[in-house]
Image (tube, helix red, strand yellow):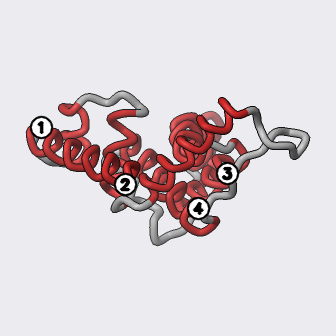
Amino acid sequence: MGTAANFMSAQAVAMTPSSTFAELYESHFAAVYRTALRVTGNPADAEDVVQTVFLRVLDREHGRDYARMPEAFFRRAAANAAIDLLRRRRVRAETGLDGAPAPAARETEVLLKERLRRAIAGLQPEDALLFLLRHVEGFTNGELARMFGQDKNNIAVRLHRIRHALQMELER
């Protein structure tokens, strides 16, 4: 009877919300951080996004949204939180470590990335996520169709329209 009671106690501890949360964190931290870093371009901002995403998971309002498709949920949550962060901060220009402006070539690259980030931040959150999952994370149209519950051709058309909108924004 002692071993059965110990087994039941171990099972109860293993199924506590904190251990489930820890498992979710360990399973999805890298994807959340990577997605946030790609959107923000800043490790500190990406860490803030990771914190925001996992705090929202603890919130009872968002607590079970991840159950059906956890990978898609966490990537979408990371992209949305990163875009929200960029919108709130209106993204400051990057400088070198010593506070001096970066060299001209680096500055041009930084400015281009900045313009692209702003253009992505101007998209609808689901469109921004779709674009990032396809072109940054490398998901196929078929995988995206399953994630978003849409037809593969619909995803292709949406991606084409999103790319066109970004191109128009960057040419302004």
**Mark 3 to mark 1: distance in Å?**
33 Å
**Residue type, label 2:** Glu
Q: Is residue 5 visible?
A: no
Mark 2 Cα shell of 10 Å, populated few (<14), some (14-19), many (≥20): some
Residue for badge 2: 169
**Residue type, label 3:** Asp
Disc 4 or 1, which lies upstream in sequence? 4
Q: Nearer the viewer, mark 4 or mark 1?
A: 4
155 or 101, which is in the foreground? 101
Disc 3 or 1, which lies upstream in sequence? 3
Disc 2 or 3, which lies upstream in sequence? 3
Mark 4 residue element: helix
Mark 4 Cα shell of 10 Å, populated few (<14), some (14-19), many (≥20): many
Q: Is residue 39 visible?
A: yes
**Residue 67 shown left or right of residue 108 in the figure:** left
Q: Nearer the viewer, mark 2 or mark 3?
A: 2
**Residue type, label 1:** Lys
**Mark 4 to mark 1: distance in Å?**
30 Å
Mark 3 residue element: helix
Disc 4 or 3, which lies upstream in sequence? 3
- Mark 3 and mark 4 in contact (Cβ < 8 Å)? yes
Residue for badge 3: 45
Disc 2 or 1, which lies upstream in sequence? 1
Residue for badge 4: 85
Image quadrant in which you'd find residue 98: top right
Which quarter shows the N terminus? top right
